[in-house]
Amino acid sequence: MPLIHECVVTTLTPEGRPHIAPLGLIEEGDFWIIAPFRPSATLSNLMANPQVTASFTDDARVFARLVTGDRSFPLTDIANWPAPRLSGALAHAELEVAQVEDDALRPRFLCKVKHAVTHRPFLGMNRARAAVLEAAILSTRLDRLPREKIDTEIAYLKIAIDKTAGDAEREAWDMVMAKIAGHFETKNDHAKDASRS
């Protein structure tokens, strides 16, 4: 399996407006690969504009907010580069699409790193942040996984939250848990409605 860097990618719409999305960039040889699903705004934007910015953060709330639909993050322009970065990023990389491998489900955009900049220090790993990230990714796959697997994963991830989370990580965890709970409440409501009809 390849090394994957979880980050926030800024692409540009055909009109030049920034769009941010949480993505895992695949490191493969000299390339960092963006592989968005069809259909998606990120995919459409990459087809229109080949210059992308990857922002790296250790703030778990960023991923929690993005997977729950909140994209209202401050962005900072980059000198001589069209796609802005997250203002709160620890670091960013400027990526340019070098080639595209088409695919019916997930085309692969092979990017070269043109420039990378560090903005703030990274102060080490934290299990709770990793747990939030895993839960955030899990929350995007609720319709594809059995409920039992989701519950088992959440129970395991919560151990790291209980043992190592600070206020930011607990806030992020609560956001993701609310999304997951809301999904299953809606699903249960639909099942009840169907049984009555």
Image: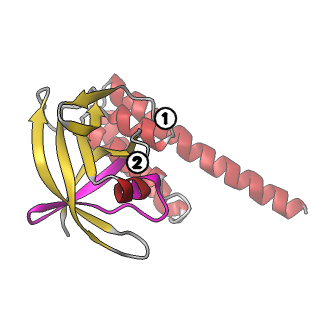
**What is the x, y in percent for residue 128?**
29, 38
Residue 66 to residue 122: above or below: below
Residue 36 to residue 94: above or below: below
What crowding class fits label 2: few (fewer than 14 Cα within 10 Å), some (14-19), or many (20 or more)?
many
Residue that appears at 35% across and 56% down: 46
Residue that appears at 13% across and 51% down: 113
Can residue 152 be seen by looking at this rendering?
A: yes
Can residue 126 be seen by looking at this rendering?
A: no
The amino acid at mark 1 is Asp
Q: Secondary structure at mark 1?
A: loop
Q: Quadrant of the N terminus?
A: bottom left
What crowding class fits label 1: few (fewer than 14 Cα within 10 Å), some (14-19), or many (20 or more)?
few
Q: Left or right: where does residue 69 sit relative to residue 110?
A: right
Residue that appears at 11% across and 32% down: 118
* Displayed quadrant of residue 163: top left
Q: Residue furthest front?
A: 15
Per the rendered image, the range of residues in magenta is: 22-43
| In magenta segment, residue 49 | no
Q: Secondary structure at mark 2?
A: helix
Residue pointed to by mark 2: 135
Q: Of the residues under marks 2 and 1, which one precedes in the sequence? A: 1
Residue pointed to by mark 1: 70
Q: Nearer the viewer, residue 68 or 9?
A: 9
**What is the x, y in percent for residue 25?**
24, 55
